[in-house]
C-alpha cells in the first residue's frame, strides 16, 4: 500500500490544524485526547459511536483450534477480545461515491482505448494499389484487444 494513501496521526494533526486555523502544537494534545477517550470508553463500555462516522466496539473471539505452522500440530487458541469498527452511513456513502467515481473514470479510459483500437484496426496499408499481406496480419480485431 502506498505510504501517501495511509493517513498517519501526524497528517491528521496537520490537516486539523489547517482546517481549524490553529497551530499543530495546539491541535496535537486534542487529537491525542480524542484517541485516548475512544480507547478508554471502548474498553469500559464496550462501544463508542460517533454519529455519521461509525462505531468502535469490543468483540469476543471464541476459543478455537489452530495449527502450529512449523509442526502442523493442533493447538488450542484461547478466547480473546478484539476491537472492531463498523462504518456509519456518512462514511459508507462517501466511500461508495468515491468507488463509483473511480470505476466511471476507468470505464471512460477503457472506452477511449477501445475506440482508439477500432480506429487503428480500420486503417489498411496499401502497397502499390493492393492491400499488403503483412498489413493484414498486423490488423487485430477490437474484441481480441485486452485492456
Image (cartoon, grey):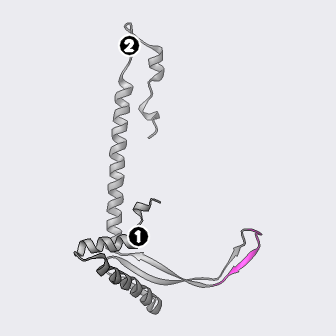
Secondary structure under tag 2 reads: strand
Q: Are marks 2 and 1 in contact (CB under 8 Å)?
A: no
Residue 8 circle label: 1
Residue beneath disc 2? 126
Eye-nearest disc, 2 or 1: 1
Report x, y in % for residue 55.
Answer: 40, 80
Q: Is residue 62 above or below residue 9?
A: below
What's drawn in magenta, residue-wise?
70-78
Image quadrant holding the C terminus, namely top left
Residue at 34% across, 57% down:
100
Report x, y in % for residue 52.
Answer: 31, 77
Report x, y in % for residue 56.
Answer: 43, 81
* Label 2 Cα crowd, 10 Å radius (few <14 / some 14-19 / many 20+): few
Report x, y in % for residue 139.
Answer: 44, 24
Image quadrant in which you'd find residue 89: bottom left
Residue 81 circle label: none
Image quadrant in which you'd find residue 98: bottom left
Q: Is residue 73 magenta?
A: yes
Q: Nearer the viewer, residue 143 or 65?
A: 65
* Label 1 Cα crowd, 10 Å radius (few <14 / some 14-19 / many 20+): few
Amino acid at each position: 500500500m502506498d505510504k501517501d494513501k495511509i493517513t498517519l496521526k501526524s497528517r491528521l494533526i496537520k490537516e486539523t490544524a489547517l482546517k481549524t486555523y490553529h497551530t499543530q502544537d495546539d491541535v496535537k494534545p486534542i487529537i491525542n485526547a480524542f484517541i485516548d477517550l475512544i480507547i478508554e470508553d471502548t474498553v469500559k463500555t464496550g462501544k463508542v459511536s460517533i454519529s455519521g462516522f461509525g462505531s468502535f466496539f469490543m468483540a469476543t473471539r471464541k476459543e478455537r483450534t489452530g495449527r502450529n505452522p512449523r509442526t502442523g500440530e493442533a493447538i488450542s487458541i484461547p478466547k480473546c477480545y478484539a476491537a472492531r469498527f463498523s462504518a456509519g452511513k456518512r462514511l459508507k456513502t462517501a466511500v461508495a461515491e468515491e468507488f463509483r467515481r473511480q470505476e466511471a473514470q476507468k470505464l471512460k479510459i477503457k472506452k477511449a482505448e477501445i475506440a482508439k483500437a477500432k480506429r487503428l484496426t480500420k486503417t489498411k496499408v496499401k502497397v502499390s494499389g493492393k492491400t499488403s499481406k503483412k498489413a493484414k496480419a498486423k490488423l487485430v480485431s477490437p474484441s481480441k484487444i485486452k485492456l
